[in-house]
Amino acid sequence: MAPVFGGGLDIRSLLGTIVNLIKSRANQICAATCDGLVLRMHYRWTFCYLLGQFLSVWYSWYYRSVITCVSHFNAETQIRLDYMNICLSYPYIDENGSRRYLLFYRWVSWSFLLLAAVYYIPRKVSKIFDNTRCKKLIEDLASQAPRYDLTERELVERAARYILYNLRTHNGLYWKYLSVNVLALMVDIFAIYFLDFILQGRFIQYGFKSYPFDRDPWKFTDYMSQTFPPFASCELTPTNKLVNKRNEKFGCHLTIMELYEKVFLGLWLWLIILTFITCCYILYLVLMWVPSVQVYILHTAKPAYVNDRIRETVQGVANNCKIGDIYLLYRLRQHLSHARFYELMNRLSDPNLLKTKVQQAGLSTPSNIRGKVTSLTPADMLKGRRPQDPHMSPKYLHHLPHVAQDPLMNPRYLNQLLDNPDIMGLGRHQHHPHYRTPRIKNTNIFIE
């Protein structure tokens, strides 16, 4: 039987739902043009981690005793609840003759929820910067990548056609992606300094000064115990208006501090790793401007049936493409096999590719079309013809093509045909079968 807590809450079913959600998210295809692994580490992994820490701390606050305080005059009885409520907000420890109040103890769990919302900002920005056409292309490649039939060849043809038509127009896509990663780095820096502010300047060096994690369970003089002291003092004075103009001093055990020290150690380690990876990836994106790095990015395994040198092909692609096209090919490479990606690059490595594209664009410009007169066939001249003018001079008649004219028709009969839905609505509208428009009998003697 599944364990049940909190008045009917099935923990096993709740954990199963969370695990299934994580699996579905992990198997989801990343097809957004302004998205990547580093960004997913921010808005997905870190977001879920912070949300999980918030739920664990929040659960401890509502289902466990978070503080125990006794008076120095009577250690066998806990103090009143209103006194304990003040001690939750203003516990302190003595450091070098001065007091350091642990103001974060009661509200630090909500900082996890705030940071989780902040870490989702890069995701919203990447959605705004997304390119729908490139996203559709990557989705098609990713969805059909596991197939081994001719579908992959068709997808390569589609990708080549899209890149050829939009060559050297993707620089904005590169700059948007770079800016989103810079925004993610700014979020990391903000999170580190925000937590350092919450912990009163002890978070940035928390992991370094805690190493090698030698604990002092007797005096609690180690750095980890000093940052999250399990035992603290609390004093009520006449300022609190609860002790009738006298001072009351209590000793308190902050039970959640043992959880805080482990949660923040893991969070400190993760933020350091995440910030380092983000900085390295931004440097990698900036180095895409270097030609040798572009050759390295586009380098792929050469198929067995190819005799050309792969480096020459990659160099030709780098010469024809700008930085935005290099980035797009870098994204497409993740969803294509080596042979198909080489086939795509082989089509883009033609040294005359840009000249051919300019010539095709020049032939289709309106300036080249303007002023040209195309010859029309007699069948084309019949389109939109008007009835022959009876006052036209006979000397102009021989210039017109000889086309047999239709016999004259009764105008009332013609109007009746145009208004008939059975004639004009065929293939467009479906009228009721009993609906008919009465027809006028044709009285023209030339039409039977």
Image (cartoon, grey):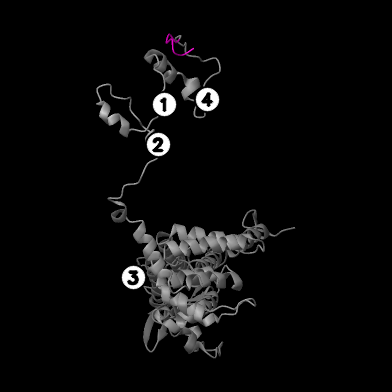
Return the residue nearer the eye: 166 or 180: 166
Amino acid type of the residue that numbered disc 2 sits on in the rendered structure = Pro
Q: CA distance from mark 3 to mark 1?
A: 115 Å
Sequence-first tag of 3 and 4: 3
379 part of magenta stretch: no
**Residue annotated with mark 3:** 238
Return the x and y of residue 278 as percentages of the image width and height.
Answer: 45, 77
Mark 1 lies on a secondary structure that is: loop
Does any portion of residue 230 appear in the rendered image? no
- Residue visible at 37% across and 15% down? 411
- Quick one: 210 or 168, which is closer to the camera? 168
Find disc 4 in the rendering and name its residue: 430
Which amino acid lies under the numbered mark 1 shown in the image of this protein? Ala
Which image quarter: residue 83? bottom left
Front disc: 3 or 2: 2
Mark 1 sits on what residue?
404
Q: Which tag is nearer the camera, tag 3 or tag 1?
A: 1
Q: Is residue 435 above or below residue 313?
A: above
Marks 1 and 2 sit apart, C-alpha to C-alpha, by: 12 Å
From the top left corner, tell me how far across and down residue 169 is, in percent.
38, 65
Q: Is residue 316 above or below residue 444?
A: below
- Name the residue carrying label 2: 378
C-alpha distance separating marks 1 and 4: 35 Å
Element at badge 2? helix
Q: Quadrant of the N terminus?
A: bottom right
Name which of mark 2 and mark 4 comes first in the sequence.
2
Left or right, 1 with respect to 356, comes to: right
Amino acid residing under circle 4 = Gln
> Label 3 sits on what residue type?
Pro
The segment highlighted magenta reads 442-448
- Mark 1 Cα within 10 Å, few/some/many (few <14, many 20+)? few
